[in-house]
Amino acid sequence: MAAINIPDKEVKDAFYKSTERFHIIACWVGIVLNLIWFASDYFVVPDYWLPFLIFRITISGITVLALILKQRLKISIYFCVFVLVLGISIQNAYMWSVMDLAHLQKHTFAYIALFIGVGMLVLWDIKLSIIILIATIISNIIFYKINSTLTIDEFLINGGLLTLSVAVFCVFLIRTRYRLTLNEIRIRLELAKSKEIIEEKHEEVLLQKKEITDSINYARSIQRAFIPTEEQFNSSFKDSFVYFKPKDIVSGDFYWAYQKDNLLFYATADCTGHGVPGGFMTMLGLSFLDDIIESKATTNPASALNLIRDKIVNTLKQSGNIGENKDGMDIAICCIDKTKNELTYSSANNSLYMIRDNELTIYKGDKQPCGFYHENKPFTAHTISLKPNDCIYTFTDGFADQFGGPKGKKFRYKQFEEILLNNVNDSFSVQKNKLSSAFESWKGDLEQVDDILVIGIKI
């Protein structure tokens, strides 16, 4: 995210709002204390109690009027505090000028207290502090020349230098506190602005995510319309199941079935990738199967795979160049001839399992994908004579490749084969449930790594 720059005016407006109440309270406290200290004047310097009182009432009165008329006169609280501090400083300068040495030393602490209090309580721009500092020096010089009987050395050594030092120190103290507070407010505003921007971006992301998810859900509806339902698939067989568990909303695995006369075709496929990319490939695969087997009446699974491969290579314009996509699919196409009681299959990478009399026979597919490959060879067809109650299983690699178990390892094909053998005599609906339970138990809390498709049929 780019750096957020808050305008200085906005920062100072926020600074004013956050410190206004505090300065108002400090101003009223200063007014009250300035009047209360008159009691000390009456007992300490009784000869000058009246001019002191007039000074105090005048300074406090002007400040009170400034506070009351602040909004009407459109003056800030800083101006009110400035008037009070400047007035008290000039007032103290006058008091010093008429005091003897003993009273000057005592009153020094009162003068110092003014600047320490201002340094601790007031927050304003340094120019106001400098004005007060200069006004304090000038007023002390003027009143000293008019009224004081002390020498310059006595005046400076017994309070003047100490008070000046404290005043200078307080100028820098106010400046430091002012800048720290200003920076703190700037940072707070930047954080608030950042949070606002993040929330806006978050809303945008949520909206975009919803739109994308809605689009993908719609794509799933289209994809599922092309893939037969499990009920439609099972209606063609004596007993069967389809265990179909996509990793994402849209699947990269798909199955397909088609029956014509005495021939029953079905396919089990795993496209490159999963999710949306895999979903696009499934649509290509399904359309190619429909075109080749339904429209062109191809009955040989190997010929069908050869034609599908050609269509994939031509459609995706694959030529084997470096960096080019190698999209394709691992797919097994089976054709059951009900008259001859034979199963002919051809497969790109995927194996076919047959369990007969509780014995497992593994039929390997060709070691090449259905897509561009550096050594493309014609796919081979294999024919198996079938007997009643033979169980045929076709599948993708998602089940065996799932990580899980006590050590977080792959499930692997050996365990998969054991599950099939141990439950082959159960109904296929029970077999499906046991496969599902075994998968979920193995996966546990881990993420599903790939789409899963297992198809079982009984002859």
Image (tube, rainbow, N blue to C red):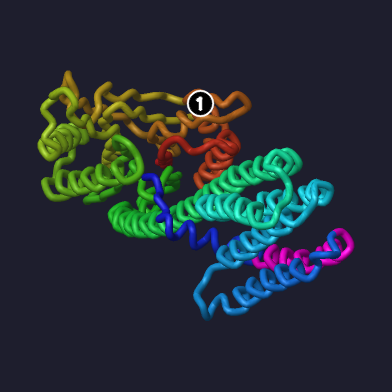
Q: Which residue is mark 1?
A: 410
> Can the viewer see residue 81 in this picture?
yes
Q: Which residues are magenta?
A: 23-44
Q: How many marks?
A: 1
The reply to whether the magenta stretch includes residue 99 is no
Against 459, is 376 above or below?
A: above
Query: Majority secondary structure of the magenta segment?
Result: helix
**Residue 273 position by quadrant:** top left
Tell me which amino acid carries mark 1.
Answer: Lys
Is 38 part of what is drawn in magenta?
A: yes
**Residue at screen point 11% across, 46% down:** 296
Q: Residue at x 68, y 72 (%)?
A: 58
Image location of residue 85, percent across then percent down: 64, 60
Q: Residue furthest right?
A: 43
The C terminus, quarter of image: top left
- Left or right of 187 in this view: 314: left
The local secondary structure at tag 1 comes to strand
267 versus 20 height, above or below:
above
Residue 59 in the image, given as x and y percentages of width and height:
67, 69
Position of the N terminus, as image quadrant, is top left
Residue 55 or 185: which is nearer the viewer? Answer: 55
